[in-house]
Amino acid sequence: MPRGYPVLHARIFPRLIRQFAAWVIALAAMLLLAAAVHAQPAPQDSAPRKAQFGDSNIAVQLHAEGTPVMGKEWLIALHFMPSAPEWHGYWSNPGDAGQGMRLQLDLPPDWEVGEARYPVPRRLLVSGLMNHIYEGPYTVLVPVTPGPSVKDFTGPVRGRVDYLACTDQICVPQDALLEAKTGGDFARWRAGVAPLLDAKAQFAISGKMLRVAIPLPQGMALADPHVFVANERLVAYAAVQTFRRLGDVLVAEIPLDPYGTGKAEALSGILAFGGDASGVAFTADLGTVPGGGEVVAGPQATITPPLWTLILGAFVGGLLLNIMPCVFPILSLKAIALARAGESEDKARAEGLAYTAGVVLACLLLGALLLALRAAGEQVGWAFQLQEPGVVVALLVLAAAITANFAGLFELPSISMRMGGERTGAFATGLLAAFVATPCTGPFMAAALGAALLLPVPLALLLFAMLGLGLALPFLLLGFVPRLRRMLPKPGPWMERFRRIMAIPMALTALALLWLTVQLGGRPFGGIALVMVFGVLLGLFVVGRLQRGGKMAWPAFGLIAAPFVAFAAIALPSVYESERAEPAESILDPQPFSAEALAAARASGKPVFVWFTADWCLTCKVNERVAIERESTRAAFAKAGVVAMVGDWTRRDEAITQFLTQQGAAGVPLYLWYAPGATAPEQLPQVLTPDLLEKQASATP
């Protein structure tokens, strides 16, 4: 939200409740296990506590490698053996749930116990919570460096370990009193733990993203890479990670935990290569992490179309925006500009180029700002500007001013119908057309804009420029094709009447923006915005009167409008309602979207329909009226047992933005259909036909 607008993190408490529910079965174990997850040396004369729970579900044995020598690394091994395949143990950082082991060794105080060395864990996602686990037998190695008292050490090493054994349904605390056996398969156990990289990695925290540069040979195969971060409460464990190659450096981008610390002085973890249990351990220092590189894994890596198809998609998508419902509010601007194009060939060409320059520049600026915000860690998508109440208020004032201009209330040379200022007017019209006409994605556009958010900056800007060129193409052709211009009526008095008629759709646009202002900020917020609009229109009315009298007009506008604008600037933040009112009810009775709710719905074995919408997306509203909010659709869904779910993106929602990015979508609308048992959703068209959802439900077993 803009500065000055409060933000209420309304999802903190539901998330805590979900985690509490996942942990409640293991609560007894949590109370008995300490927070430390690494081996801790104990005083030689302090005997370990008595074991209480035993190790019947996951047994453990302690082994020592040979005879300890002062100053040389001596390995202690903890070999864990589940009693049945369904039991699993945990890595040092267990993830969103679980508990790492706590080891207490009875060693002399001058012996140094190092960091435990673990095998590469695997991921287990349960109800949206990510767990870092081990299935089957696994071994943890603990390096020990004996001190001078080793000459008096007679052994054996004794100790105690506390840990957790879990299935997908229950968790049971485990503990064991240990006495090290000499020998064991240390060669195999060494090979089983993740080897530590010789060179240190570098990491940086940028905005809401952790970026880690890991030295790794370029030829190293990566089937499904994943970074297990040892630092707790730093990253979002279930978030999708992105990997880029820059020569012999692999850069991992991991979203931060929105409720975590967000800070780290040092970093450690394991990079899993995927496909098997291979990987490497690493430590990282704060430093510079390079940008760019080739995407090798993550949501960005799903961009399979060649570049030329993305360019063509952006161009055709921009062209089709001229007939999409979300462009209708600006057709009045384009209609007037098209009529003026018939004045002369030179002027038509000049205006065609100026209009195109305005459209392309606006698309480039919006795209560059979007890319910059995402690079800073902000979870934003296409049409992000309409999620900001301050921007919508500014658009409301602008739409009201244009309505007044079309109605003849005052004259503004940059968009006036009169002679003079044609190039400036066409350029300004192009800027405004692109800014207002691109809140929704249409056919062909979705893949291109989704790719633009993920490609290197120069290629991404090329796609935004092609989008603008497609949007401007009809007007550009009129400027350079005389036959098309001759099809337009000749300039004359009708143009002034046509301009006044076009004030009607612009007034409707202003009313729609006023409604959106209320939706974003509440009724008091919309009321104050309306007062500001009244002050601006009053100033423009005085300007028109002075213009018709041939007098200096614009200083008077400043004197009249300034108090209203100043009042609104002070009052709007104070009445802004940070918690949005409930969206309009749907006859489908959908659940609010969340990753956890979607996972639960899919686990039910029923078909799931998820749609993402926003109050400012006209395409979304047309689709809802045409295909979603229909009694026949409700009946078909009820018959097939379809679970409906809606993601409201009217206000910025990081969870929805992240999910849209994972699906390769830059914005709304987005419609997903999950068939029972399907591993991936079917993405439905962005323009829905009336019976599409009924047929989809009927075809589902």
Image: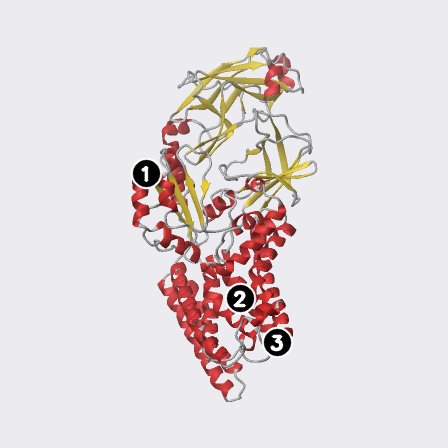
Category of crowding for the residue at label 2, using alpha-carbon neighbours closer than 10 angstroms: few (below 14), some (14–19), many (at least 20) = some
Category of crowding for the residue at label 1, using alpha-carbon neighbours closer than 10 angstroms: few (below 14), some (14–19), many (at least 20) = some
According to the picture, the residue beneath numbered tag 1 turns out to be 640
Whether residue 203 appears in this view of the structure is yes
According to the picture, the residue beneath numbered tag 2 turns out to be 432
* Residue at the spot 67% in from the left edge and 19% down from the top edge: 72
Find residue 65 and name its label. Answer: none
Earlier sequence position, callout 3 versus callout 2: 3
The image position of residue 212, as x and y in percent, is: 61, 39
User: Which numbered mark, 3 or 2, is in the foreground of this view?
Assistant: 3
Residue in front for this viewpoint, 345 or 247: 345
Apparent side of residue 58 relative to residue 153 in the rendered image (left or right): left
Secondary structure under badge 1? helix
The image position of residue 18, as x and y in percent, is: 38, 38
Residue in front for this viewpoint, 182 or 92: 92
The image position of residue 199, as x and y in percent, is: 69, 33
Secondary structure under badge 2? helix
* Residue at the spot 49% in from the left edge and 57% down from the top edge: 439
According to the picture, the residue beneath numbered tag 3 turns out to be 344
The type of residue carrying mark 3 is Ser
Earlier sequence position, callout 2 versus callout 1: 2
Label 3 – label 1 distance at C-alpha: 61 Å
The mark tally for this picture is 3
